[in-house]
Image (tube, rainbow, N blue to C red):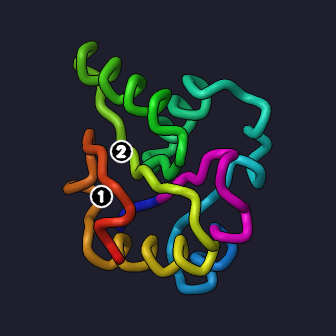
Amino acid sequence: MLKLYLNENLSWRIARALREYGYDVISSQEVGMNQEDDPQQFAFAVEQQRAVVTNNFADFIALHEQYLERDMTHSGVILTTKCPISTLIRRLRALLEHVSAEHMANQIRWLNEFD
């Protein structure tokens, strides 16, 4: 099953709601990572084998590219635009139902694909 890590740009309430549906989702706030920089956040997600969900496009696309250039693997980057929490939860549930951890590995996906 695909596991998610919501970075500091997304509410911890999303992680809590998704866990109520049985998904393995944590947020940076819940694990005390809000003050860490993006490379540390990404490294934490990699260590935890979690795909990062963020609306910080530029930094996480650059981190994705750096990992690939160095032949390093990660569990994926899921990019989203700012939208209501209910929309994010609905889209993340659709993603979690249709994308496996194997298919997300080393990939970037846009969450709006799952509308």
Viewer-proximal residue among 12 and 74: 12
Residue at the image position 52 percent from the left and 41 percent from the top: 45
Q: Position of residue 7 (x, y in %)?
A: 62, 46
Report the disc number at residue 11. none
Amino acid type at circle 2 is Ser
Q: Is residue 12 left or right of residue 50?
A: right
Q: Quadrant of the N terminus?
A: bottom left
Viewer-proximal residue among 21 and 54: 54
Q: Give the CA distance from mark 1 to mark 2.
A: 7 Å
Can you identify the residue that label 1 sits on? 101
Of the numbered discs 1 and 2, the one sitting upstream in the chain is 2
Q: Quadrant of the C terminus?
A: bottom left
Viewer-proximal residue among 78 and 20: 78
Region of the chain picked out in magenta, as a range: 4-14
Q: Is 92 situated above or below 76?
A: below
Q: Is residue 81 left or right of residue 32?
A: left
Q: Position of residue 93 (x, y in %)?
A: 44, 78
Residue at the image position 50 percent from the left and 56 percent from the top: 81
SS at mark 2 in the image: loop
**Residue 75 magenta:** no
Q: Is residue 107 left or right of residue 10?
A: left
Residue at the image position 59 percent from the left and 28 percent from the top: 38
Residue at the image position 30 percent from the left and 45 percent from the top: 108
Q: Position of residue 80 (x, y in %)?
A: 46, 55
Q: Position of residue 68 (x, y in %)?
A: 25, 23
Q: Are marks 1 and 2 in contact (CB under 8 Å)?
A: yes
Q: Is 4 situated above or below 90?
A: above
SS at mark 1 in the image: helix
Amino acid type at circle 1 is Ala
Q: Residue furthest top?
A: 70
Neighbour tally class for label 1: few under 14, some 14-19, many 20 plus, Cα within 10 Å: some
Can you identify the residue that label 2 sits on? 75
